[in-house]
């Protein structure tokens, strides 16, 4: 990834140069890492992770290393969201597969 020197936003590759997604500043591509760059304009629906209170957890990944405080069941669906600073671990949001209890897990 390459970031804008002016505003710090992520830059995308367009026509052989890097363009800031916020302020429009352009810069030469970092050719040493050019093979690592992949630019996308948006995410597809199956790439989005929903963690709002009313969102469905069914079909999400399953954790077997947790225990529900309400019923003691050992399996829960979970989603992951970055709730703190980028240098902090993400938060896992769980929903018990047995009773539907919801809780957060901090690493």
Image (cartoon, helix red, strand yellow):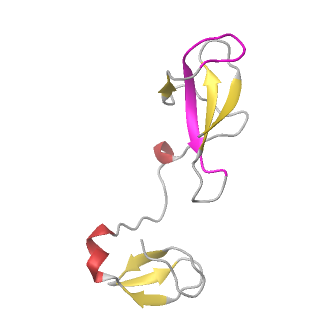
Rendered image quadrant of residue 29: bottom left
Provide residue 79's location: percent of width, then percent of height. Answer: 57, 37
Query: 45 left or right of 104?
Result: left
Of 80 and 72, nearer the camera is 72
Provide residue 98's location: percent of width, then percent of height. Answer: 62, 12
- Residue occupying the point 49% across, 78% down: 3
Residues shaded magenta: 67-83
- Residue occupying the point 65% across, 18% down: 68
Query: 33 left or right of 86?
Result: left
Query: 66 left or right of 34?
Result: right
Give the quarter of the figure containing the C terminus. Answer: top right
Provide residue 66's location: percent of width, then percent of height. Answer: 57, 22
- Residue occupying the point 68% across, 10% down: 71
Query: 53 left or right of 33?
Result: right
Q: Is residue 71 magenta?
A: yes
Of 28 and 74, nearer the camera is 74
Provide residue 76's location: percent of width, then percent of height. Answer: 57, 22
Above/below status of 21 relative to 83? below
Give the quarter of the figure containing the N terminus. Answer: bottom left
Most common SS among magenta residues: loop
In this figure, what is the number of numbered marks? Answer: 0
- Residue occupying the point 54% across, 18% down: 75
Q: Does the magenta stretch include residue 93?
A: no
Above/below status of 33 relative to 62? below
């Amino acid at each position: 990834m390459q970031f804008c020197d002016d505003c710090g936003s992520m830059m995308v590759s367009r026509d052989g140069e890097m363009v800031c997604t916020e302020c429009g500043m352009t810069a030469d591509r970092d050719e040493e890492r050019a093979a690592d760059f992949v630019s996308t304009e948006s995410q597809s629906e199956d790439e989005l992770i929903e963690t709002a209170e009313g969102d469905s957890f069914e079909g999400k990944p399953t954790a077997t290393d947790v225990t529900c405080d309400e019923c003691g069941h050992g399996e829960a669906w979970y989603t992951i969201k970055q709730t703190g600073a980028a240098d902090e671990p993400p938060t896992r949001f769980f929903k018990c597969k047995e009773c539907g209890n919801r809780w957060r897990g901090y690493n």
